[in-house]
Amino acid sequence: MDFEKALELLIPPPLVPYEVPQGDGWSTIERKLNTPLPRDYKQFIERYGSGRIDEFLSILNPFSSNKHRNLLWQMEMQLGTLRELKEGGTEVVPFEFFPSPGGLLPFGLTDNGDVLYWLTVGQPDIWPVAVNEGRSPEWDTYQVGMVEFLWKILGRQDSCKIFPSDFPSSSLSFVPSVKPK
């Protein structure tokens, strides 16, 4: 199944996405991370840019000018916070941290403070998804890529015990970020 096309049927992308890669943008980001990123993630960013899904979920964009939605800034922030919690014994984190093999690499955030991660096991195109509940040690994992995960959750083919029961809504949408004036 073409999950990218199926996702576009659920949440049509904006006509003009905001904050998409220019020139060798992906090469620069992947050099900084020292790893390729999943193809479905890159296609998502190219089609949707920065914005929010159903006014609840944001996919981190390495080209975002908003540090709170920027993949690189959030990677440092989220992994730093998790390390502190794990080392302080206040939270059980059952995974390593990126760049360790199989380590967590954040790619999304919810308005409730939940974080969506890739488990960087094997080739990037097959990285599974792990969701950590905000302010909680709860984890939920999925053996699918990012776009398939989104399609299953948004299309109600699967559920995430960490997300609220009213997500996704019946009026599902993608609201793009807008360029500041």
Image (cartoon, rainbow, N blue to C red):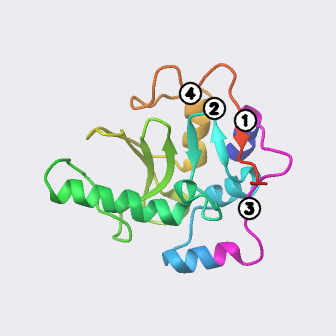
Instruction: Tell me which amino acid carries mark 3.
Output: Val
Query: Which of the numbered marks, if any, corresponds to residue 54?
Result: 2
Query: Badges 1 and 2: C-beta atoms under 8 Å apart?
Result: yes
Instruction: Tell me which amino acid carries mark 4.
Output: Gln
Instruction: Tell me which amino acid carries mark 2.
Output: Asp
Comparing labels 3 and 4, the label whose residue is closer to the camera: 3
Q: Could you tell me which secondary element the residue under label 4 belongs to?
A: loop
| Marks 4 and 2, the one that precedes in the sequence | 2
Residue 118 placement: quadrant:
bottom left
Q: Residue at x 33, y 64 (%)?
A: 97
Query: Which of the numbered marks, if any, corresponds to residue 20?
Result: 3
Work out which residue is located at the far left of the displayed protein and give it: 89
Q: Could you tell me which secondary element the residue under label 1 belongs to?
A: loop
Comparing labels 1 and 2, the label whose residue is closer to the camera: 2
The Cα–Cα distance between marks 2 and 3, rounded to whole angstroms, is 20 Å
**Magenta-drawn segment:** 9-27
Which residue has dot 4 on it? 157
| Majority SS type along the magenta span | loop
Coordinates of residue 131 in the picture (x, y in percent): 40, 43
Coordinates of residue 101 in the picture (x, y in percent): 35, 69
Coordinates of residue 125 in the picture (x, y in percent): 56, 60
| Marks 1 and 3, the one that precedes in the sequence | 1
| Marks 3 and 4, the one that precedes in the sequence | 3
Instruction: Tell me which amino acid carries mark 1.
Output: Ile
| Marks 1 and 2, the one that precedes in the sequence | 1
